Image (cartoon, helix red, strand yellow):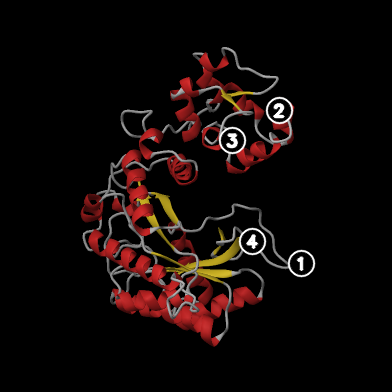
Amino acid sequence: MKKSLRERLAILSDAAKYDASCASSGTSKRDSRSGGLGSTESSGICHAYAPDGRCISLLKILMTNFCIYDCAYCINRSSSNVERARFSADEVVWLTLEFYRRNYIEGLFLSSGIIRSSDYTMEQMVKIAKDLRLKHDFRGYIHLKTIPEASAALIEEAGLYADRLSINIELPTDAGVEALAPQKHPQNIRRSMGELRQKIDEFSEPTFRRRRKRFVPAGQSTQMIIGADATNDATILGSSASLYGRFRLRRVYYSAFSPIPDASNVLPLIKPPLIREHRLYQADWLYRFYGFDIAEITAGRKDGMLDLDLDPKLAWALENRERFPVDVNRADKEVLFRVPGLGVKSVQSLLNARRYRRLKIEDLVRLKISVRKVKPFIVTDDWTPIKLIDRANLRELFAPEPEQLVLL
């Protein structure tokens, strides 16, 4: 019996949760039945950030969870026994427009399993984006997960209608891809990412005669699954750094591997804690915006793994105590960036404030800086940590409280 549109939406929105290029809000359930506009309850709605920093609601679905590939880490692999469903291109267009008209969403995040062939699947996804833009004058945000094996012409056409394209690198190493996804080829994935970067560069060239055309204004990103093999965090972050430099990615998304219930004989692996995914995002942020090298972020442990109990900047500071305390009235921006508890905005606020007066602890409070976190690492006009930075148990001041285990 053919599934209803609502049933297929439930299946394909749930299947899309494994695509990590936008994040769920985790907010309370609300709807507009008692007044107002919008809802947080509808299937497939998630929140993501637009290029200008706005938080926007997206309809996040797969076109289908049928797939001809048998990647061992994927819940939708061909040998999995999950319930299958598929939307036509016209149904995805209709859903997007109806959700938009009801003020549920501001855009679309679309991915898909591979059906028939890479080119056929990509053609369907391009048709959806093209119809939304040209037939319905849809001006909302569109993010397409493209198929790396698809032709360069199709990926280029997708870029004319999508705000962002992403091509999944899949795993941190080529060896991991070859072992767990033998039907996919790392060199083809990187080739597609490189071709997309070249097209983005061409369309952004001021002298390019087609410069008036809009082409992937939010750039390209990728997703990397972590925990499906034994790759350590240092290798993962090193791979990400290489991708950022080579393809000028806007973002690498990390997705913690979740074991597949029926794949115990294929991947007998233990699920990594989600906190590892969080620490990788934090370390990635330090590399991209705070001037840290990957080697120094991961130097704290011999096994190349990040400390799960402490954020990477704090863990680095505790391993490099000789660099502290830092005088907030004299230190330059790059040094202040390395102080635990100081972010990009708070550092700029400090630099602005100290032009007019010498800063004290009360000034940090007014700037909404976490004094508890920064005090061991800074000097102000009225504060010196004296021996605090040298305390043997300094780590214990920041480590999370032990949790009582629950017996099941």
> Label 4: few (<14), some or many (≥20) within 10 Å?
many
Separation of marks 4 and 3 at Cα, in angstroms? 33 Å
Separation of marks 4 and 2 at Cα, in angstroms? 47 Å
Closer to us: mark 4 or mark 2?
Answer: 2
Could you tell me which residue is drawn at 23 percent across and 61 percent down?
187
Residue at the limit of the structure toward the bottom, as seen here = 135
Separation of marks 3 and 2 at Cα, in angstroms? 18 Å
324 or 162, nearer to the observer: 324
**How many marks do you count on the picture?**
4
38 or 211, nearer to the observer: 211
Closer to us: mark 3 or mark 1?
Answer: 3
Q: Are marks 4 and 3 in contact (CB under 8 Å)?
A: no
- Give the residue pinned by disc 4: 40
Secondary structure beneath disc 4? loop
Q: Position of residue 180 (x, y in %)?
A: 25, 54
Q: Amino acid at mark 4?
A: Thr
- Viewport quadrant of the N terminus: bottom left
- Give the residue pinned by disc 3: 342
302 or 326, nearer to the observer: 326
* Any part of residue 137 in sight: yes
Separation of marks 2 and 1 at Cα, in angstroms? 48 Å
- Give the residue pinned by disc 2: 358
Q: Amino acid at mark 1?
A: Gly
Q: Position of residue 268 (x, y in %)?
A: 28, 44
Secondary structure beneath disc 3? loop
Q: Which mark is residue 36?
A: 1
Occupied quadrant, residue 234: top left
229 or 319, nearer to the observer: 319
Q: Amino acid at mark 2?
A: Arg
Q: Are marks 4 and 1 in contact (CB under 8 Å)?
A: no
Q: Which mark is residue 89?
A: none
Q: Position of residue 407 (x, y in %)?
A: 48, 31
